Amino acid sequence: EAQVTQNPRYLITVTGKKLTVTCSQNMNHEYMSWYRQDPGLGLRQIYYSMNVEVTDKGDVPEGYKVSRKEKRNFPLILESPSPNQTSLYFCASSLNPTAGETQYFGPGTRLLVL
Amino acid sequence: GENVEQHPSTLSVQEGDSAVIKCTYSDSASNYFPWYKQELGKRPQLIIDIRSNVGEKKDQRIAVTLNKTAKHFSLHITETQPEDSAVYFCAASKSNFGNEKLTFGTGTRLTIIP
């Protein structure tokens, strides 16, 4: 089954404690992306990756890191989480999202930073 | 960078009537405009998209129109049904190789009244 998976689905942590949210897709997609969703602000792109070892900043990259060492995985790293990073995070993948190829979203990770 | 504004933020429509959601964008170079539907507690899903070389696209009860001169695009849902109740997001992107950043609107919560 074609899918995008994220782990963990729910996470409560404290300020400053490094964490990683994993994202994996089994569709051989070249494009992967991370978004955060906050009430009233919609979906905001954090980082995206066009292919292995190619990443670029989205609209809200501050406080986040990503890596793309292999095509299927695109982890999101919060080196020193802060309460303003409390949010719902979605990973997504696509063959090419702006060429009309559907962007598939993962189930979401709800993060609470105390 | 690109800025996408979406209106209204909430919309209630009687079942069977039509619903229209409007978005404006700031970057005249943007050339790809997808719409996503997010049901409560679920992930966003692409429902329709349009490229800048066409003015309108239809898929059954859903249509999208684009006015490049005015830099706005709209989602039209006809003969609305209860299952159309969801949050809808528009987005805009410049499709250039190596630059596939998607900027989303803030969302419209559509409620269909039975």
Image (spheres, coloured by chain):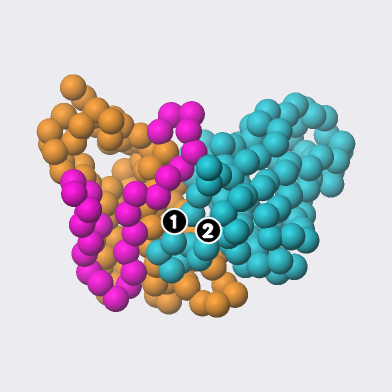
Residue B44 in percent (x, y) is at 46, 43
Chain letter for the part of the structure drawn in cyan: A
Rendered shade, chain B = orange
| Contact between labelled residues 1 and 2, with CB atoms less than 8 Å apart | yes
- Corner quadrant of residue A21: top right
- Corner quadrant of residue B74: bottom left
Residue A95 falls inside the magenta stretch: no
Q: Along the horizontal axis of the image, is B33 left or right of A4?
A: left
Q: Residue at x 43, y 76 (%)?
A: B29
Q: Along the horizontal axis of the image, is A104 left or right of A31?
A: left
Q: Which labelled disc corresponds to residue A94?
A: 2
Q: Which residue is drawn at 62% across and 67% down?
A: A50
Residue B9 in percent (x, y) is at 36, 40
Residue A93 in percent (x, y) is at 56, 54
Q: For mark 1, does the 10 Å Cα neighbourhood hold few (<14), some (14 to 19), or many (20 or more) residues?
A: some
Q: Along the horizontal axis of the image, is B39 left or right of A72?
A: left
The amino acid on which the numbered mark 2 sits, given as a three-letter code, is Ser
The amino acid on which the numbered mark 1 sits, given as a three-letter code, is Thr
Query: Which structural element holds mark 2?
Result: strand
**Residue A54 seen from this side:** yes
Q: For mark 2, does the 10 Å Cα neighbourhood hold few (<14), some (14 to 19), or many (20 or more) residues?
A: many
Residue A104 in percent (x, y) is at 50, 49
Q: Name the residue under label 1.
A: A102
**Residue A86 seen from this side:** no
Q: Residue at x 49, y 54 (%)?
A: A103
Residue at the right extreme of this rendering? A17
Segment tinted magenta in the rendering: B39-64
Residue B52 falls inside the magenta stretch: yes
